Image: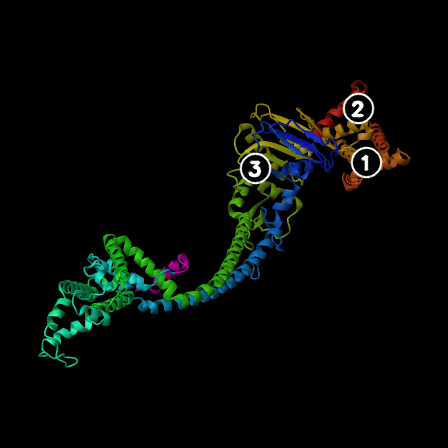
Amino acid sequence: MLQYLRLRGAPAFDPASGTDIGPLKPVNFFFGSNGSGKTTISRALADSTRFTGTTLEWNPATSVLGIKVYNRDYVNATLTPAGHLAGVFLLGETNAEIQTEIESLTGPSGSIAAAKEGLAGLRASLDAKNGEIDGVRTALKEAAWAKRNDVPAELREMFTGYNNSKDRLLDRLLEVAAANLSASEDFTALTSEAAAVLAEDAQPLLELPLGRDIKIEDAPGHSLLGAAVVGSGDVRLAPLIQQLGNADWVQHGRTHLEHANGVCPFCQQTVPSDLGEQLEAYFDRTYVEQMEQLSALNQHFESWEQQWTTYLDDLPAKPGVAEHLNAERLATARAALELVIAETRAQLSAKLSGPSSILSVPDPSPQVEGVNAVVREANTAIQGFNLLLRNRSAARKSLLDRCWVVFARVTLVAELARYEGAMPGHLTGKESIEGQIVSATADIRAKESRLRELQAKVTSSKPIIDRINRLLDSVGFHSFSLAESTAVQDGYTLVRSNGDVATETLSEGERTFITFLYFAQSLHGSPQDEAEPNDLLAVIDDPISSLDSDVLYAVSTLVRRLVEDVAAGTGRVRQLLLMTHNAHFHKDVTYRPHGGPKLGSWKYGVVRKRSGQSSEVELRDDNPIQTAYGALWDEVKRSAERPSESAVGLQNTLRRILETYFKVLGGVDDPAIIAKFEGDEQVICRSLFTWVNAGSHSIFDDLDYSPTPSTVEANLRVFRRIFEEHGQIGHYRMMMGEPVEEVSAEDQAVEVESGSEAIE
């Protein structure tokens, strides 16, 4: 519950110290004249930030209530005319400004239509950009589709699952290209793996045998190559043969001597009879053994040579050679080996032909190693092949993945480069357009959300009309009712008691009353706004602007129902602040009948505007405004006691007392009374009696007239003399609280009669 309103920086009240209004009760009634500051109080409650320094104090601090305020601002904001249609109006916050905003959103040239047109343009641009992107993708897609045949047949299993969809093929290609910027191998290297990984009938391969090295330096007779093989030196012919160095020629000649019949086969001279014996002795057993060693060495080499020839000839036919052996390197290594073999063969032949010659043969081991190195590489590949067979599942995936890398970065290197060169710019452009589309879409949604928000404020008139008409019927008000407008959606019209639809503009009283009915129905049932709390503090400021008795009774009845609901703790209203300037209305709503329902704890306040000073608020536990007539006299007494703080409108108050009281007496000859005054007092007296011709509110308007202490005293003096001249001084003294003994019996009789009439 609100305990205090600490009002600071608000007009009409002390700008320095402000005004503390409280402690408050569940039901609080405030009475004050127009201009005293009641509306300022209601505005502070509607929005405490409106006046800097103003605060609301709740007790307990956690029991903060939602505040709904009915005042002049609420009337202006809630009830607005529907365009230029006389007699048609709108209720709620849907005023002319909101309708203008709705039209600015929804009209043919409204912002929603313009935003949607802009969005359509952006989407067209996006379609065009997507077309460019599709063109670049299509070029790469068609190139990839066509170049599938460039992949070796053994590896085309990589396209399994992609042969029926160009788009899937492209997606896979782009995925691989994004993850691999280059390829470190080619299809040739991958093809050898395919035999083990992709062929279902692949079998493990045997490793290739290595060629045997001859190690010729370890062969028997190798040492004779570096020494001269000659005959015995003990023979008579030995010195001559050695001198001539023709042992090899003599050895070859011996084969011809046997068939020469004693004649030298070369010089045709008769040979000595012991020549054969001497030659036989020269070429002795040692010579023969050495020659046999040389011949054995030659045969050993020829056998080794034949093994290599067979080995090299058979090697290409062995399983796995074609896939794993480097034929080009093997051919090079074989040629090098065969060259060394040929050279060695020639040297051995020369030694056999001329045993006395000193020769050397090349070591074929490096060339043998060259051939075997190629074979070892093949065996390494064969080992890898066999390993792949043992891990075929994982190897298959790895191989196919690498095939895709080679396909992307080798086979399609040019096409992919064009794609990767063009696509970033297109994608950046697309991203920019999509960002604009997101912003434009969000803008449209925001505008449409704002439209729904505005439309939601145009609350459907039908249920509200029903509730308001039920309120009117419940308080017995039948002067008019509300009906739906046929001209404006969710608009209202006023139907007179005779059934005629009002076509004229609503009067100020009707505006105030209808808006109050709208306010009253909003306090019941569920909150109309999700953000509105269920428990409320209702603030009602001057709901009566007409003296029509039916309206006053209807409003009073509705307010008293609120008072009863607050006391009973039913409904949504937990606290009520009512402010009025109408004494009769104040009396009506504050009436507490004996034996009636308990109406809880009340507080009474008077908002008083003082001449030349700030307004003040006085809170009391008892009702200071018993009747309208008594309230008027209270103002007179206060002005008499403190002329410098006299309420604005004192002269009007005096006129209303004279009007009320002397209507009871009747037959008042005011010209005769006026004639008894002279000078300024006569002017004052005449002004106080002008109600006879123009009503009590036609002279010295409260807003334009500010009395001084001297004028207050003059008005009070004339006012008293009027009662004296009429013989009604007793009544004056009684109402002013002067000693009763000074009142005559005759005066008292008149006072009793007139006082009772005036109160009613």
Eyeballing the image, is 339 above or below 475? below
Question: Which region of the structure is painted magenta?
Answer: 163-182
Say if the magenta span includes residue 290. no
Q: Quadrant of the C terminus?
A: top right
Distance between the alpha carbons at the discs numbered 2 and 1: 19 Å
Q: Residues within 10 Å of mark 1 (few under 14, many from 20)?
A: many
Residue at the far bottom: name it: 268
Q: Position of residue 488 (x, y in %)?
A: 56, 54
* Depth check, front residue: 453 or 264: 264
Comes first in the chain, label 1 or label 3: 3
- Looking at the rendered structure, the kind of residue marked 1 is Leu
- Looking at the rendered structure, the kind of residue marked 3 is Val
Q: Position of residue 624 (x, y in %)?
A: 69, 26
Q: Read off the residue under disc 1.
A: 688
- Looking at the rendered structure, the kind of residue marked 2 is Arg
Question: Circle 3 — which element?
Answer: loop
Q: Read off the residue under disc 2.
A: 733
Residue 690 occupies quadrant: top right
Q: Residues within 10 Å of mark 3 (few under 14, many from 20)?
A: some
Question: Circle 1 — which element?
Answer: helix
Q: Read off the residue under disc 3.
A: 475
Distance between the alpha carbons at the discs numbered 3 and 2: 41 Å
Comes first in the chain, label 2 or label 1: 1
